Amino acid sequence: MALELRQQLKLSQQLVMTPQLQQAIKLLQLSRVELVDMVQQELLENPLLEEAAVEPSQEKAEAEQDARSAEAVDNGEAMADGVGDQDAMQGADWENYLGEFSSTGRQSSAREAEIPEEGLSFEARLSSKPSLEGHLEWQIRLSDMTPEQVDIAEVILGNLGSQGYLQSTVEEIAEEAKCSVDAVEETLHRVQRMDPVGVAARDPRECLLVQLEVNGYDDPILHSLVSDHLEDLEKRRYKPLARKFRLTLEGLKEYLDFLQTLDPMPGAAFGSGEAQYVSPDVHVYKYEDDFVIVLNDDGLPQLTVNDFYLDSVKDGRGAPEKEYLNERLRSAQWLMKSLYQRQRTLYKVMESLVRFQRGFFEHGVTRLKPLILKDVADDIEMHESTISRITTSKYVSTPHGVFELKFFFNSALGMDDGSQVGSESVKAHIKELIGKEDTKKPLSDEKIADILKGRLQVNIARRTVAKYRSSLGIPSSSKRKQVF
């Protein structure tokens, strides 16, 4: 057979992840804080983007223009190439491209522009908390320690855990500081008696004993309880302890009440982790017999295209500059449309969640229904991966508190009548039952399962109750029991 060359035309379809498409997908899963940072970064890098100056009396864009924008997003229209869409871009009221999802009036936006410091939270005006290491180092510098002891103390500080306990042995510290074990013990003794008292202890027993010593408590029963019976106290073996020390239960309770005033984790107050304050992405309000959904765009800059650079592109002066500006123009268009699509998708998902979980919005967590991503995806005709991304790190403010959107998706438990109840609803009932129990006779997991079967007509096993209870951070009935 003779070999020959020939041309062949083949038509095929394939999905190409362009940088613009990757950016649109990334925008879906960004939290509010990350989104604001990302937009601010684009404002710095793209000369064609600028933050619009919002006028208090400025009206919203025409509804027809918003509909055309939404239709363009739905149909996946290609971005304008070159100067083809410059006239449309220049005539469009981009300052209002998120207007229909705005949660505040333009008066408040203008007022924030006039007095920016009023928009800062109280926490943002405070200085950072001192760290445990910095607090101890300050005391060491003010003490009368020798230079050698200061070096050893710095090694000790470098080996402290988040709770203030020493994470290394004295032998390891002596080797690192190039000194004797006795020198480490002497320095460690001084560090443990600094503020907070008991820091750098090797175990809870040593930590509490140091606190008893510094506070001048030399009661032998207290020392014995801490030295030899911490495990008995943890497991609530009170009666044998009362017999051993010849105390009544009331007398033993006085010792236990005092021990509870001590701090077994002296470094916890200096934790480096700051409290994270959540700003909801969506607000859901009840108005008469319906619920109103308002997207929160506070702090998100209103973007527009710089007229000066648009005129430069239109004039076409300088081929290299024109090519760069065209690229930046397409990037600005894509970002603004992607932001619109993100807000629109979030709004549609929230609408679907309100429809599916109306019982929750009416009555609270106990009416939460089982729900999966596919249910919402089918309802709004989107892919499950899109629903997963848009519900990641997003929060909604409801009449019953602030919840992550992922909270509304939960597994199901079968009921006797064939229907289903959400696992989060069952957890809420378990928490309610334990909150109302008699602390001297706490409910066992089996008893809770029986109550739920009677109250909810749900098929639930004891081990399922134990799993839900553990996920709520609630100890077992034996550890919840109060003897006194």
Image: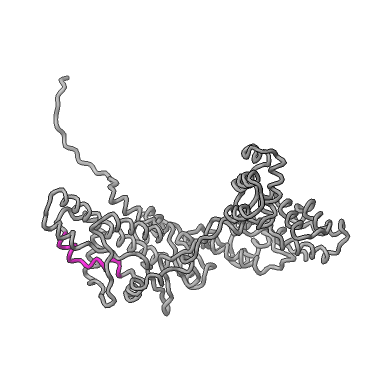
Location of residue 256 in the rendering, given as x and y in whole percent from the top left corner: 77, 62
Observer-nearest of 277 and 119: 119
Location of residue 406 in the rendering, given as x and y in whole percent from the top left corner: 46, 59
User: Which corner quadrant holds the C terminus?
Assistant: bottom right
The residue located at (68%, 47%) in the rendering is 187
Q: Quadrant of residue 220?
A: bottom right
Q: Is residue 68 above or below residue 322?
A: below
Q: Quadrant of residue 284?
A: bottom left
Q: Residue furthest bottom?
A: 288
Asked whether, in this view, residue 113 is left or right of residue 327, the answer is right
Location of residue 67 in the rendering, given as x and y in whole percent from the top left corner: 24, 67
Residue 338, magenta (yes or no): no
Query: How did the renderer colour the structure?
Result: one colour
The residue located at (64%, 67%) in the rendering is 433
Observer-nearest of 152 and 375: 152
Q: Residue furthest right?
A: 246
Q: Is residue 167 in view?
A: no
Location of residue 150 in the rendering, given as x and y in whole percent from the top left corner: 63, 47
Q: Is residue 64 in view?
A: yes
User: Which corner quadrant holds the N terminus?
Assistant: top left
Magenta residues?
A: 86-99
The residue located at (22%, 54%) in the rendering is 328
Observer-nearest of 63 and 306: 306
